[in-house]
Image: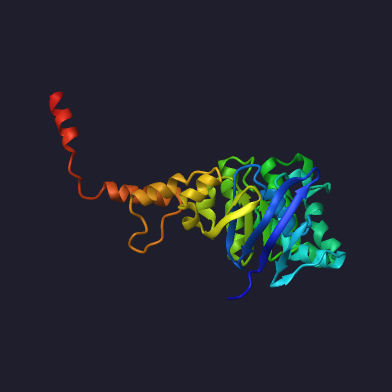
């Protein structure tokens, strides 16, 4: 088997005061996949993400990129962060230029790219995230959802192979979540490997190819999304409940004939309607007796 595109091997990390954040952590990011790091709040997910692009350096263990351990000198970090882009949970932590266009331009200009190339990249990512009309807007006037997409655009302008996002849907309303996930799906279809953290099991089930179940600074289990979410023991130990859509789909017998298990609300509802429209089930005797008492 080929090596993962990005991997963490045996990571340990402590915050000042001896607070353990990561312990003997292993993680694999496969090229072209959508990986969700799923865990309860406070389990250490953000700390892990900050290791994946070299912002934090582990006390023990290593990050591997394309089968090679990474280095932390300035030149190596620049190359690393060009390949692995990180979007923080709070967009205000990443936006600092006066306008959207200036903010998105900063990364490519810092790489020393010619201005025509930078301009082309800015136009491309603004269109991809459907925020072209915001180009000349002041960043401080944007809504929270708009700031999220601008922060992602600034990272995408660097053209990373892997986009890592910390709780990308946090703070967004339903429409904002849909628009953001649609944009991320298009990026994935264009070849970007995606990694994001969340505590939302429904989102993880609907969206992920693979899930790394995270608890107390370590990956408890990693694998195909539905298989991980069906591991009740691991889910309980991680203080999470299986997604309702998966439980309903399983009760309806989805996937038993080899067909893929439905992953969206719409597909589960459609399956339920088909089941209800099928041959009528016999009425239980208890219900028949109860009905006769009220005639």
Closer to the camera, 231 or 254? 231
Residue 202 visible in image? no
Name the side, left or right, on which 278 lies relative to 208.
left
Q: Residue at x 33, y 54 (%)?
A: 253
Q: Residue 214 versus residue 261: which sits nearer the camera?
A: 214
The relative height of residue 192 versus residue 214 in the rendered view (above or below) is below
Left or right, 250 with respect to 166, comes to: left
Q: Which quarter of the image is occupied by the C terminus? A: top left
- Residue 72: x and y in percent read 83, 64
Q: Residue at x 54, y 46 (%)?
A: 237
Quarter of the rendering containing residue 195: bottom right
Q: Please tell me which residue is depicted at 58% across the width and 76% down the height of the picture.
A: 1
- Does 3 sit above or below residue 294? below
Q: Residue furthest bottom?
A: 1
The answer to whether one can see residue 52 in this image is yes
Image coords of residue 99 (percent x, y) = 80, 48
Up the image or down, 285 lies above or below 122; here it is: above
Tell me which residue sits at (80%, 52%) in the image: 103
The residue closer to the viewer here, 142 or 45, is: 45
Q: Nearer the viewer, residue 179 or 198?
A: 198
């Amino acid at each position: 088997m080929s090596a993962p595109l990005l991997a963490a091997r045996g990571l340990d990390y402590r915050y000042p005061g001896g607070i353990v954040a990561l312990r003997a952590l292993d993680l694999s990011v496969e090229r072209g996949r959508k990986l969700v790091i799923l865990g309860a709040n406070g389990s250490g997910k953000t700390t892990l993400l900050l290791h994946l692009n070299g912002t934090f350096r582990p006390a023990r263990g290593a990050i591997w990129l394309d089968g090679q351990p990474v280095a932390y000198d300035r030149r190596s970090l620049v190359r690393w962060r060009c390949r692995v882009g990180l979007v923080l949970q709070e967009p205000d932590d990443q936006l600092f230029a006066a306008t959207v266009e200036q903010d998105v331009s900063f990364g490519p200009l810092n790489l020393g790219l010619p201005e025509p190339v930078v301009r082309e990249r800015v136009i491309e990512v603004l269109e991809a995230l459907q925020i072209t009309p915001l180009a000349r807007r002041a960043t401080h006037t944007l809504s929270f959802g708009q700031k999220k997409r601008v922060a992602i655009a600034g990272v995408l302008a660097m053209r990373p192979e892997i986009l890592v996002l910390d709780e990308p849907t946090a703070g967004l309303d339903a429409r904002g979540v849909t628009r953001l996930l649609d944009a991320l799906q298009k990026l994935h279809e264009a070849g970007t490997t995606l990694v994001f953290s969340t505590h939302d099991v429904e989102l993880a089930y609907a969206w992920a190819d693979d899930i790394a179940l995270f608890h107390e600074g370590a990956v408890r289990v990693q694998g195909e999304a539905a298989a991980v979410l069906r591991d009740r023991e691991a889910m309980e130990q991680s203080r999470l409940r299986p997604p309702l859509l998966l439980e309903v789909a399983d009760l309806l017998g989805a996937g038993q004939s080899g067909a893929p298990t439905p992953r969206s609300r719409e597909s589960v509802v459609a399956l339920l309607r088909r089941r209800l429209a099928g041959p009528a089930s016999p009425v239980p005797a208890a219900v028949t007796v109860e009905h006769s008492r009220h005639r």
